């Protein structure tokens, strides 16, 4: 009888020790390291807290995780569902290259006078366009939420380009090579700079050289969507070498430029 009681007591102790033994999960990091321990908290897309040797609890950002191997007997039904889905989401968001589109509204005021006009004796000095406004889109390739290079095009309306009412409005269609740089790719709010250069189709098929630049701030709304505001400068210079009009108009417009200071506000989306 005494031996039976001793045996039952030993079995009870073993079962109690086994029940208190934590079941270990493994987190594999993108740098190849593996961390084993007991997962304390899992927030998909944000972080994982894991208890390692010495009962120390560390927090690992989801952006550093390549895979999570959870013990099937330990994981709850929710964890079993979330862990593999979240892992795929992280991997898809961390592609180095992706398609990106910028879509913005641009507006500004003319700065200074138009120089180079050759018919001042007949018409007087032509002022720079008072205002301009338009839409612009750039589509191309993004890299690690930091760099963008693509093709831009848009429509701009110019008001106040002439002293004559019947010639007071004009339009242009810019076609550019567009490059943008997000200074702090891992931050929600970051400075952003842009530069674009190309040609514009101007009213009457006059060719112009176009340059746009800007600096401002980008705010990350989600992993794929950002909004931004740029303090921008736009420069259009008429060029006879780019013109497809007749020689008289080429001479008439040669050397004239439009210079604008304004803003660009828009959103960018990554696919």
Image: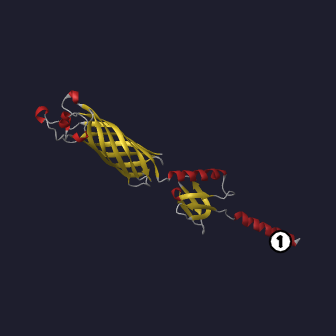
Q: What is the x, y in percent for residue 77?
A: 66, 51
x, y (%) of residue 268? 42, 44
SS at badge 1: helix
Q: Nearer the viewer, residue 121 or 206?
A: 206
Q: In this orientation, does residue 45 appear?
A: no
Does residue 205 appear to the left or right of 71 in the view shown?
left
Q: What is the image's colouring?
A: secondary structure
**Relative image position of residue 162 (x, y in whole percent):** 20, 33
At a point 83% along the width and 71% down the height, the residue shown is 6
* Rendered residue at 10%/34% (across/down): 121
Residue nearer the viewer, 246 or 82: 246
Answer above or below: position of 192 versus 153: below
Q: Which residue is mark 1?
A: 6
Classify the position of the N terminus by image quarter: bottom right
Q: Nearer the viewer, residue 78 or 223?
A: 223
From the top left corner, tell me how far across and down residue 7 is, in percent: 83, 70
Q: Is residue 22 above or below residue 228?
A: below
44 vs 123, nearest the viewer: 123
Question: Left or right of 88: which side holds 252?
Answer: left
**Residue at the far bottom in the pictured view:** 3
């Amino acid at each position: 009888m005494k031996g039976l009681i001793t045996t039952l007591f030993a079995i009870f102790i073993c079962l109690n020790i086994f029940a208190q033994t934590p079941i270990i999960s493994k987190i594999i990091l993108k740098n190849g390291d593996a961390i084993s321990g007991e997962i304390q908290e899992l927030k998909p897309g944000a972080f994982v807290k894991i208890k390692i040797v010495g009962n120390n609890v560390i927090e690992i950002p989801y952006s550093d995780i390549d895979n999570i191997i959870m013990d099937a007997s330990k994981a709850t039904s929710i964890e079993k569902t979330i862990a593999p889905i979240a892992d795929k989401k992280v991997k898809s968001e961390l592609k180095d290259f992706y398609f990106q589109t910028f879509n913005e509204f641009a507006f500004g005021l003319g700065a200074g006078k138009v120089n180079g006009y050759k018919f001042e004796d007949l018409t007087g000095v032509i002022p720079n366009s008072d205002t301009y406004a338009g839409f612009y889109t750039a589509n191309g390739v993004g890299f690690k939420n930091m760099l963008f290079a693509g093709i831009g095009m848009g429509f701009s309306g110019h008001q106040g380009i002439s002293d004559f009412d019947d010639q007071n409005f004009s339009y242009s269609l810019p076609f550019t090579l567009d490059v943008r740089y997000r200074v702090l790719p891992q931050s929600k709010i970051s400075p952003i700079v842009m530069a674009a250069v190309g040609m514009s189709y101007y009213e009457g098929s006059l060719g112009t050289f176009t340059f746009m630049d800007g600096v401002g701030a980008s705010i990350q709304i989600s992993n794929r969507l950002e909004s931004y505001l740029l303090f921008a400068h736009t420069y259009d210079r008429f060029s006879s070498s780019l013109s497809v009009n007749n020689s008289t108009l080429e001479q008439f417009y040669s050397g004239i430029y439009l210079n604008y200071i304004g803003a660009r506000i828009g959103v960018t989306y990554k696919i």
